[in-house]
Image (cartoon, rainbow, N blue to C red):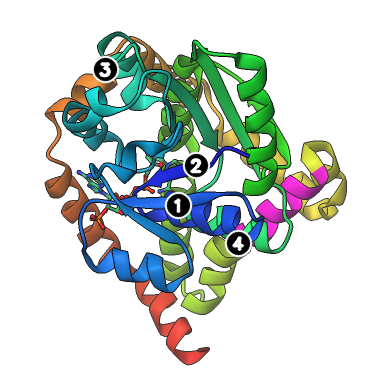
Amino acid sequence: MMRLTIIGFGNQARSWAFNLKDSNFPVRVALRSKNASFESVASSGLEAVEIGSSDFFQDEIYALLIPDHLHVEFLKNYGEHFRPGTTILYAHGYSLLKHQFELLYPNINHVLYAPKSIGSELRKQFQIKGKLGAVYSIEHFHGDSLLFEQWMKNFSKALGINLGPYKTTIKNETEADLYSEQGLLCSLIPYAASEMFRGLTEKGIEPELAYFECWHELKLIVNAMVDVGPKGFFDLISPNALIGSEKGFQKLFTNGFQNNLNSLLSEIQDGSFNQEIDEANVDEIRNRIINRWKASPLQMTFEKMKQENP
Ligand SMILES: NC(=O)c1ccc[n+]([C@@H]2O[C@H](COP(=O)([O-])OP(=O)(O)OC[C@H]3O[C@@H](n4cnc5c(N)ncnc54)[C@H](OP(=O)(O)O)[C@@H]3O)[C@@H](O)[C@H]2O)c1
């Protein structure tokens, strides 16, 4: 089995590396220089190699698991040094779609391989044999694609992917990923939870109870939704929950809501969101959002309950 060199040892990379190692899939980790991560890689029984060293360029398949906005710089530094026919896997299509690496570095096969999971869950679900999905695109692969897909099948199994991997395009993965972050996962869920928590506590409901209702139960109910599917979920809930669900659906999911969702997607597809990303000051935005949540009653209740229930 052809070895995979994972570049980086962050959120995704760590889980990829440990899952593959536990599955006896040949893997090593490439890092910038002899920094603290080198120790951490070596002490966990993984092979480490320095990015840019002659040994680094030995392999045929790499996974570039460093933040997306740094892919351009990485390829500027090292893109020309990879042997022709080398394959690089990307865990998200964003940089590929934006910079068209296939035109800049045509000697490299630029392959999308996106596990649909945050890094920590990729590891956790692997350990408990949970369900993990992935999508891929070989639209910029120019070698023996049958052979490569066979390698990818074995690699997927070793990584713990047991839903798919399903074929897509780089454009589709990028747009769907950005849209689900904006419309559901990183906006609707946390902000609806926070608003509901505020509403309940303002009416005198104990913060611990409000925390259970609006935050902790999210995890449990989503588990059930994913395990039994949408129909199974609505079969499962109590009559009161069913009647309440219909009432909430009618009241909250208005045309305005649908229009706003549509406009999020069109701004992704017409490139305006890309421009927003280019012009954004990420540090300023992160600080502003972290400060908002740091001071939120929901966060304070989370911390208090964590301390009381270690
Ligand atoms: N976060 C997630 O769970 C998640 C989910 C889905 C997809 N993805 C995708 O996975 C990829 C990696 O994201 P991530 O969140 O896992 O990244 P991350 O944790 O922020 O990556 C950190 C790693 O990148 C290395 N690094 C940073 N700058 C570098 C450079 N200029 N050259 C070489 N190495 C550098 C760091 O090495 P040092 O130790 O040297 O600093 C560190 O090992 C992205 O394409 C992302 O879209 C991530």
Q: Position of residue 35 (x, y in %)?
A: 21, 64
Q: Position of residue 72 (x, y in %)?
A: 22, 28
Residue that numbered label 3 is attached to:
99
| Residue at 75% from the left image edge and 53% from the top image edge | 224
Mark 3 or 1: the one toward you: 1
Q: Residues within 10 Å of mark 2 (few under 14, many from 20)?
A: many
Q: Position of residue 61 (x, y in %)?
A: 47, 33
The residues tagged by marks 2 and 3 sit, at their Cα atoms, a distance apart of: 24 Å
Residue that numbered label 2 is attached to:
4
Asked if residue 206 shows in the view, the reply is no
Residue type beneath disc 1: Arg
For residue 28, the mark is 1
Label 3 CB, ligand 1: below 8 Å? no
Mark 2 or 4: the one toward you: 2
Residue that numbered label 4 is attached to:
124
| Quarter of the rendering containing residue 115 | top right
